[in-house]
Structure formats: structure tokens, C-alpha cells
Image: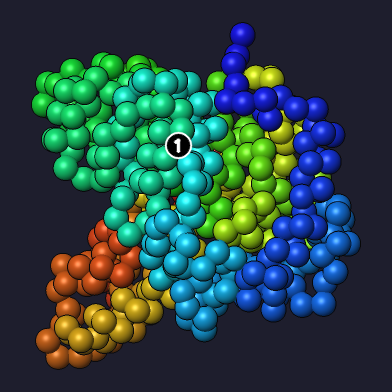
Amino acid sequence: MTDYYDDLECRDPEERERALMAALPGQVGHAQDQASGLAKILTGIPAADITSRDALARLPVTRKSDLIALHEASPPFGGLNATPTSGLRRLFLSPGPIADLQGRGPDWFRFGRALYAAGVRPGEVVHNCFSYHLTPAGFMMEDAAAAIGCPVFPGGVGNTDRQVQAIHHFGASVYAGTPDFLMVILDKAEELGVDIATLTKATVGGGALFPAVREEYRRRGVHVRQNYGTADCGLIAYESEAMEGLIIDDSIIVEIVQPGTNDLAADGEIGEVVVTLLNPDYPLIRFGTGDLSSFMLGQSSCGRTAPRIKGLVGRADQTTKIRGMFVYPGQMDAVVKQAAEIGPAITKVRLEVGNEDGRDTARLLCEVGDAPGGPPLAGGVEEIFTDICKVHANVEYVKTGSLPNDGKIIDDTRSYD
């Protein structure tokens, strides 16, 4: 018999919907009163009238791709925060740059539910390989583990030799991190001859978990469950032992809209995931994540009754995520401008993102015009890319005019099937 994180997971769906809609007008009013940026976006909207999904769907969508400009115009958070900076717990600067925040209180990002659904129980050692540097992912998992009652090893990324030693030394049973880094750790343990057989569970996010990779993990004794969240929204949805889509978190409202519009997608149609947070610190109303998915019919066989979405199938824009880090088209322009300081100008670039053996790959293809001295050293451009995007890409030079004229700056060729 499955047990649950709390009673909210098994509520009658109508009871859940009534509770969410009852909280909605107060949250819209709170956003208008306390968040200056949202007050502008929601000007003239009577909060008391927003009591249904139909009413909510008439409000404008604020997209993740809008945040860079909003934050620059009104730092640090574009007026989207209701709690002032002085009242927050942590401040982050994610690639973009985009400012992110964490309020006070336990498990503020609400990932405890995802860990529990992945089979994590009190007392288990969680080896946390989400990054603690600049971005909130590491703290999301740490606070979630604390909410369940689990000690955490704050591994972060890199240093795989020591990561393996730590898993062995502390007997960690749970991995938390991106899907591909788990493979790096397992391979390193085999290479070093270190026994990490205690590691039998994993909760992964920040990248696609491909079926063949999941099966390889299962073959090696690690049962993997996915979580889906963002630095802005916290937990959005999570996978249970049923592995029948992603179950939406009980404390948020999710819509699927036609990409680039405010309009709802038809039932079952793929569209952009749009989230409304019932969070007093950060009352985002109709926040467009840029991720593509669709609703599923029915309920999970695990007994949780919240609506479900299918796994993510891509992005609504050219923004992509590589090894857990968002990379934006505008960052490619910044790379080109900085690269001009160390060599002849790069005239055109295209970032190709793929997946090999379950691991994300990135190649920055560069065209360089005819100039004496040849192109700048690829290693120098790679350093610039890493500094700006916080993730590595291999730099390759190609002939002038060889890159496609299709408007793409980022070409994500990964298949999410």
C-alpha cells in the first residue's frame, strides 16, 4: 500500500479545485497590492472576479523570457516579489542573468513532495549533486531532504573522485541531481573499483531522462524518478512509483497555453506550461515557463489525484537547458562580442545541443570572416562561453556561409521520446 507525503495528495479532485480557486482572488489582490511589477501587469483587473480557471485564462501571461528585461528595468526582481529583499532568505543570479529568490520557511520550493514520491524516507542519506553555486537548485533539494528528515551530503557538481568516495563513506542511498551526472558518478565508481551499491534511489531534474538511460540505471541497481521545477516556480510536477506522467504539485495552478499567446491549448494538445503560484513572497500570476508539455487524462494508479502532465517535450522558444542550466539566445551574442576582444570577429554562431549515451552535448559552431591572423583560439572562446553560460561547450570553426539561414541560434536536436 502506497503511503503519501500528506493528505493533500489524495484529496477529491473537486475539493482540490475548490481550494485553489478560493485562494486565487486573494493571491491576485496580494500581487496587485504588494508587487509593483505585477500591479502594472494586472492593472484594471478586479481581483475579486478571478475565481475560476476561465477568469484566470483572461489574464496576461508573463514569460520567463521577459524576466531579463524586467529585472534590468526594475532591479532586482522586476517588482514581481511581494516580500522585499530584506525579508528574503537567499538571493540567486541564474544565467541570463535572471535574479531568483527564496523566502523564509521550511521547504520553500516544495520539493519534499517529489523526494517522498521517489521513495525517499526519513534517515536516508541524500547525496545532493545539484549546484549550490549562484543558482537555487542545491538548496531546493537540501531543504526538501530536511523536510523529510534526511541528512544531506552537499556534493554539488564536479570532483567525481571525491563524490564517489563520499557516497561509499556515508552509505548514501539517494542521488539528487541532473540525469546525466549520475552516469558520470556510476562510471567513475566502476573505474575506481569503489563499491557504491548503497545508492539505490535517484530523484533527477534539470534535463531530459531518456528511456534507455533510465533502463541502464535500473540495470545498475538505481531506480530513478523525475522531478520538474524551475528556479522561479519551485516544484511544478513530479513522478511517482507508477511512472505515469508527472503529477502536478498540490499547491499551484498549472495551465497549458498555445505557445506565444495567452490562450489555453485544446485538451491534450502540446503547449507551454504556465504556472500560478499561491506563494505570498513571490505571487507569480500566469508565469510562462517556456517548457512544452500537455495534460494527461485520468489519475495516476499510485492513488494521487492531482492532474498530470506528460514529460517535457521541448521549449516554446530557442532557450534550452544543458546539464541543468538554462542557455539563452542572447547569451550567444554576448559570447561573440567578448570573443572579438581576443581575435578576428566571429560573424555568425549556432549552438548545437545533442545527447550522446545519456549525456548532454553542446557544440558552438562559429563562422569567422576573412581576416589576418586566423580565428581566436577555440579554447579562449570556450572559456568565454563557460563564463557567460555557466556550462561548457566545444567550439568548432566552420566555413563562412555554411551555417543554415533558418533563424536558429540554438538548435536543440535531442529527442524527448
The answer to which quarter of the image holds residue 39 is bottom right
- Residue 69 at x, y percent in the picture: 52, 79
The quarter holding residue 12 reads top right
Count of marks overlaid on the render = 1
Residue reaching furthest front? 87
Q: Quarter of the image for the N terminus: give it.
A: top right
Q: What type is the residue that disc 1 sits on?
A: Ala
Task: Give residue 165's position: percent from left, percent from top.
Answer: 15, 28
Is residue 198 in view? yes
Residue located at (65% from left, 19% from top): 302
Classify mark 1: helix, strand or loop.
helix
Q: Is residue 289 above or below residue 344?
A: above
Question: 264 or 231, which is in the foreground?
Answer: 231
Residue 22 drawn above or below residue 239: below
Residue 67 location, x and y as percent? 53, 71
Q: Quadrant of the C terminus?
A: top right
The image quadrant that residue 28 belongs to is bottom right
Query: What residue sits right under mark 1 in the picture?
Result: 144
**Category of crowding for the residue at label 1, using alpha-carbon neighbours closer than 10 angstroms: few (below 14), some (14–19), many (at least 20):** many
In the rendered image, residue 283, in percent from the top left (x then y), is placed at 64, 60
Compared to 243, does 206 lie above or below? below
Relative side of 64 to 375, left or right: right
Q: Farthest residue in the top direction?
A: 1
Tell whether 368 sits left or right of 407.
Answer: left
